[in-house]
Amino acid sequence: MELFGETLGVGTAMFLLLALLMALSFEFVNGFHDTANAVATVIYTHTLKPWIAVVWSGLWNLLGVLTSTGAVAFGVVALLPVELVLNVGSGAGFAMVFALLISAIVWNVGTWYLGLPASSSHTLIGSIMGVGLANSLVSGHVFGEGVNWSKASEVFSSLIVSPIVGFVCSAILLLLLKVLIRRPELYRPPDSVKPPPWWIRIILLLTCTGVSFAHGSNDGQKGMGLIMLILIGIIPAVFALNLDADPKAVADLELNARKTMAMLDLAGNGRNIEDQAAAGVLSAFLKTTGSFNDDIFPALAAKDRAIVNRLNGKNTFADVPKEERPQLRSDIYLVSESLNKLNRLGKLTEPEQQAALTEFRSKLRPMTQFIPVWVKFAVAIALGFGTMIGWKRIVVTVGEKIGKSHLTYAQGASAELVAMGTIMAADSFGLPVSTTHVLSSGIAGTMAANRSGLQAKTLRNIVLAWVLTLPACVLIGAATFSGALYVVLNVLHM
């Protein structure tokens, strides 16, 4: 069977299609679980009819996904164990992908059914941690080193701080609106039948549009990253490297590799390490327990040499033999991530050295961190359809069950403006945030600022879902990975 320009066995082709379908199912669930937050205010305030609101939101999610940089997608992938990222096509790599998708979908569907605005970001990241911890046990490594804890700390910070920002900033914004805009109708609960005045409708439509766009640009990338892992694992000849990279960019990459090879040879005092040994040195360095040693610079020089040898005389990546492309991708990944860690540890002390290696890393990353346009479209469509089908449960919770009084126009607009700004700021740093938590906490902040009162039962359930999501998904992810690994290794004999 021919797929994506490659001839695959029937079993492999079915495996690929199943994995892609599950990844899109995750985004579909994400759509009716998270994107419902974006349309809650416009539906609840009768600004737009439900079917118009969800179609409108779906279109702006599409635009958000299409214009996204991919930084969040690969930021999430960076949480995975190094050996699984480098060997996605192995049995453990396939088990990892299925475990992530199954556990994330199960938790998201469960919390959606209960009408709880839980976080898809927390869900996926908890699943990733569970897979990493289980892999460290199964593979005989030190428990816990299967998780990229430095990257996890960045992600945790964004996930913990963003709801606080949502609560505080939404409350402040509502109070400012009350001082600056003295229009009583803006602060009244919506009429049960009549739509709001036209100028309020425009404001709410704009905030809904902004949140939808921001959600697509951030949350949509998580599914994109997983789809790329699947494609790289099963069809590395096509997706391991960016075959559409400009010939000049490929030539610049080889030139930079030659320059930095000489610099790293000098930094390593001329010590030589074989290419195979270099891969082991850098893989160990990138693990949580990995620390800097005298072999790092010689290992990087060896990998630079390997990159130069594979690109020598090649105008594009398409000129690289298919069987060499997965190894070239691994070399680029190891060098890029090792340079990032060296910079983070402060080991690149000389300004000239730091500038040259930082420039080299900027040339390396686009060669493996790319998202085809069709992947963006597929994710965006899955998000849009999810929004259109399952919006109602979360909308009711957001609109009616957080505060003791009905949500006003000003409260909805304040919460959505803050959510939009927070998500876009996180997107620029390549960090995942929870649309659900930012918007829910923003609405709670406006209720507190308005002294409307908060419904303790709903808040307790939301906080409980927030607290339980990570540990629950860690356990589900670990258990699912162990089961999936057994099936893949013993049933599929991979």
Image (cartoon, helix red, strand yellow):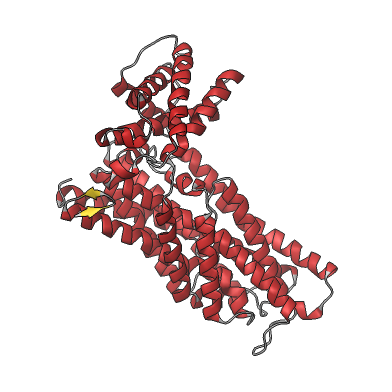
Task: Please determine whether, in this image, residue 101 is positioned above or below residue 460.
Answer: above
- For image coordinates 29% across by 42% down, the residue present is 236
Pick the residue in front: 400 or 186: 186
Quarter where residue 60 is shown: bottom right
Total numbered badges shown on the rendered structure = 0
Q: Position of residue 396 (x, y in %)?
A: 55, 78
Decide if residue 34 is in sight here: yes
Pick the residue in front: 197 or 111: 197
Quarter where residue 1 is shown: bottom left
Task: Please determine whether, in this image, residue 275 is positioned above or below residue 209.
Answer: above
Q: Quadrant of the C terminus?
A: top left
The single residue placed furthest to the bottom in the displayed view is 193
- For image coordinates 57% across by 47% down, the residue present is 157
Q: Position of residue 471 (x, y in %)?
A: 43, 54
Q: Position of residue 400 (x, y in %)?
A: 60, 78
Pick the residue in front: 53 or 259: 259
Q: Position of residue 139 (x, y in %)?
A: 27, 38
Q: Left or right of 207: which side holds 183?
A: right
Q: Left or right of 74: which side holds 37?
A: right
Decide if residue 443 is in sight here: no
Q: Left or right of 182: which side holds 426?
A: left
Task: Please determine whether, in this image, residue 372 is positioned above or below residue 463.
Answer: above
Pick the residue in front: 67 or 18: 67
Task: Please determine whether, in this image, residue 86 is positioned above or below residue 279.
Answer: below
